[in-house]
Amino acid sequence: MNQSREVNAGSNLQRIVIVGGGAGGLVLATELGDKLKRNPEIRVTLVDRSPTHIWKPLLHEVAAGSINSYQDELNYFAHGASHHFEFQLGAMTGIDRAAKKISLAALLDDQGKILVPERQLSYTALVIAVGSTSNDFGTAGAREHCIFLDSRQQAEMLHKQFLSTYIIAHAEENPPANGNSLNIAIIGAGATGVELAAELKSAAEQLAAYGLKELQARDVHVTLFEAGPRILPMLTDQVAVAARRQLEKMGITVTTGAKIVEVSAQGLQTADGEFIPASLRVWSAGIKAPDFLAGLDGLEVNRINQLAVRPTLQTTTDPAIFAFGDCASCEHDGMRVPPRAQAAHQQATFLAHNLPRFLAGQPLRHFSFKDHGSLVSLSEQHAVGRLMGNLLGGINLHGLIARLMYRFLYRQHQYSLHGLLRTGVFMLKDLLGKGANPRLKLH
């Protein structure tokens, strides 16, 4: 007996199905739902493997415990009801392009029992926005012995391991005479690695202030490894130098030109033959699109599984399938659009206008990327970055001003999802919560 079933079968509606509820996919579903709410002939459906959303650039703060992910998460079902789109929980496993259907894996409970069997969704236009995952480049032992920071679950796992070290030290009746220590190795000094290093070092200072004094901040050794000649390769030399100076001021060791060739439970092996002991190992070097994209019914992908798209963001193989964000290889003015949240947001807004044109059979516009610069957080009071604009050209920022601009990016994301009033409520809630709750999540 076939356990699969088709969702919304037999309807003559035009269906836009968006797979992936990250920053780009959720913004697109929200904008389309609001825009098409009075059109009964078009249905918008968002698909994601998780029932909730958290902004991915916040994951380093979740890992350090700087924010409580359960307070900042968004429920797709509730948000869809408020913004006129349908949500389907599940992971996409395949596409039948001839039948214009996608397959979703069965939903299981905690005991492995099938709650919802494998099912199919029909589409008129399909949008793939499944983001990216860390790329370990086939490094021996990396997948087994490193924590990756691709999801909230992984970030929370890192937080638990980090906090467990403090709890164990705090419970010791006879601590060692030379004190406790914790060696943290972060492989990859792009934005994620740099932000995580700064956040963990700052968290170490806070934990000592909360009474977990058996492990002082000076005993937490954070080392950042970068295979290239400098950290933050996507930013200017001047900004990278300022960031490195701030990291070293915080007590973080920055090692460039260090290629990691093997990872074990005890530490890292470099290409130069040096072994670096590390009890916590985090991989943040490089990205790739999810592996399953390489087998989607003949869709063209590049060497890191990104779907090849035209300037309209339609895939090169099938005009009814669109892709954007980190999982898409998109070029603009002869250069590849960078895998950043700002690019995904711009593409989402672009598709919110282009998809109705596609359904109406109208000519599609071409995507144009505008680089507004990048900002990197270096704990609560500091950040570095470069802003781009037509009037100023480019301006480097650092310190508290850069940090305030960095926090503004999250408020901008909230505004695109909730509007001005609710974003103001969230800001007030966060402000009041600072005085009522610990600065770190302690469980």
Image (cartoon, rainbow, N blue to C red):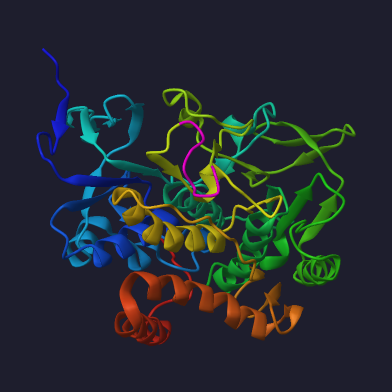
- For residue 205, which quarter of the picture? bottom right
Residue occupying image coordinates x 65% and y 28%: 141
Eyeballing the image, is 117 above or below 13?
Answer: above
Residue occupying image coordinates x 48% and y 38%: 315
Residue occupying image coordinates x 74% and y 37%: 268
Residue occupying image coordinates x 79% and y 41%: 276
Horizontal placement of 262 versus 21: left or right? Answer: right
Eyeballing the image, is 236 above or below 438?
Answer: above
Horizontal placement of 438 versus 132: left or right? Answer: left
Instruction: Compare residues 155 and 322 and report the one nearer the observer.
Output: 322
- For residue 71, which quarter of the picture? bottom left
Task: Examine the rendering and report whether any part of residue 81 can be seen.
Answer: yes
Percent of width and height locating residue 249: 80, 72
Please give the range of residues in magenta. Answer: 310-317
Percent of width and height locating residue 13: 15, 45
Instruction: Compare residues 39 and 267 and report the one nearer the observer.
Output: 39
Task: Examine the rendering and report whether any part of residue 180 can be seen.
Answer: no
The extreme top residue here reads: 1
Percent of width and height locating residue 161: 52, 49
Where, quadrant-wise, is the C terminus in this rendering? bottom left
Horizontal placement of 122 versus 336: left or right? Answer: left
Where, quadrant-wise, is the N terminus in this rendering? top left
Which SS does the magenta portion mostly show? loop
Eyeballing the image, is 17 above or below 380?
Answer: above
Percent of width and height locating residue 391: 71, 84
How many numbered marks does the figure carry? 0
The extreme right residue here reads: 272
